[in-house]
Image (cartoon, helix red, strand yellow):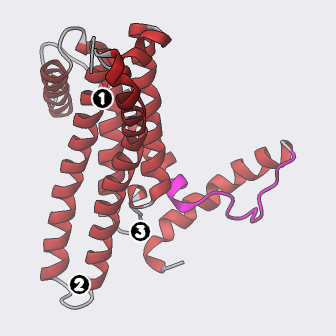
């Protein structure tokens, strides 16, 4: 383990004092008690804690008369999410904003975490991005079932013409499942390659190239977080539509 991620290792070591006894109590002791969870999991926990602390700070400082900078930023972000959801999903879109916002914020923080010395980018591992993709997949399919009923939702994959449905249904099902792979690999590949390029070119020109690559990493982080908001919104709109 490199010296550049010592904080990650320190966090993992601290979590080991909680995770290892818990797993041992469940008769499932980890193979390495001093390092029971992967680094990317430790980083995910850190992101979760950052979101919780940020939410508590925001709630404590909420003001109608004199809103602070943090509140202004979050209000702009929420308004942007509401407009995006409304344009894509349409009527009743506000009920999906909390999920889209939480997912986008989690991925954004994960994406930019690696820019901080001694930390890693958890979305640079396929396990993290696949977890986000599976959560999205389960959510929008659940919304489709809740909206149409199980049989009604399955009928939306069949299409309006019954005799074409024999061919269309398996294609639609496979396409639906493939969305998990598309979501997870797109995010993982962008963040992994970005970090790899930073490491490769950073050793060639110590100042100019790393600064440029970090700026590019930041830009890609926002773009990928936006895509992970946009595509789930599209999938939700398809799942609750009358036909697709």
Above or below, 107 relative to 217? above
Above or below, 198 relative to 122? below
Q: Which residue is mark 1?
A: 235
Q: Quadrant of residue 204?
A: bottom left
* Image position of 2 (left or right of 203): right
Q: Is residue 28 magenta?
A: yes
Quarter occupied by the C terminus: top left
Sooner in the amino-acid sequence: mark 2 or mark 1: 2
Residues packed near mark 2 inside 10 Å, few (<14), some (14 to 19) or many (20 plus): some
Q: Is residue 238 visible?
A: yes
Q: Is 122 in front, or is 189? A: 189
Residues packed near mark 1 inside 10 Å, few (<14), some (14 to 19) or many (20 plus): many
- SS label for mark 3: loop
Q: Which residue corresponds to the image point at 26% horizontal and 76% vertical from the top-left?
A: 198
Q: Is 109 in front, or is 229? A: 229
- SS label for mark 2: helix
Q: Which x, y percent locates residue 75?
A: 17, 25
Q: Which residue is mark 2?
A: 201
Q: Which x, y percent locates residue 159?
A: 31, 19
The residue sitting at the bottom extreme is: 204
Q: Which residue corresponds to the image point at 32% horizontal and 24% vertical from the top-left?
A: 164
Above or below, 244 relative to 186? above
- Extent of the magenta region: 27-42
- Foreground: disc 2 or disc 1: 1
């Amino acid at each position: 383990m490199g010296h550049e991620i010592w904080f990650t290792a320190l966090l993992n070591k601290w979590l080991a004092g909680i995770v290892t006894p818990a797993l041992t109590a469940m008769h499932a002791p980890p193979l390495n008690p001093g390092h029971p969870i992967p680094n990317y999991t430790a980083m995910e926990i850190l992101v979760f804690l950052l979101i919780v602390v940020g939410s508590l700070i925001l709630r404590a400082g909420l003001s109608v008369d004199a809103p602070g900078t943090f509140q202004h930023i979050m209000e702009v972000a929420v308004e942007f999410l509401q407009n995006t959801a409304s344009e894509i999903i349409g009527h009743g879109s506000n009920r999906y904003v909390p999920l889209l916002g939480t997912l986008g914020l989690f991925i954004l923080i994960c994406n930019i975490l690696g820019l901080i010395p001694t930390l890693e980018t958890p979305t640079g591992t396929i396990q993290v991005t696949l977890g986000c993709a599976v959560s999205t997949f389960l959510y929008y399919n659940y919304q489709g079932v809740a909206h149409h009923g199980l049989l009604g939702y399955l009928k939306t994959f069949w299409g309006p013409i019954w005799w074409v449905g024999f061919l269309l249904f398996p294609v639609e099902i496979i396409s639906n499942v493939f969305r998990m792979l598309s979501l997870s690999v797109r995010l993982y590949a962008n963040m992994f390659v970005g970090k790899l390029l930073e490491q490769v070119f950073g050793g060639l020109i110590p100042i100019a190239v790393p600064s440029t690559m970090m700026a590019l990493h930041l830009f890609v982080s926002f773009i990928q977080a936006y895509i992970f908001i946009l595509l789930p919104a599209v999938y939700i709109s398809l799942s609750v539509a009358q036909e697709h």
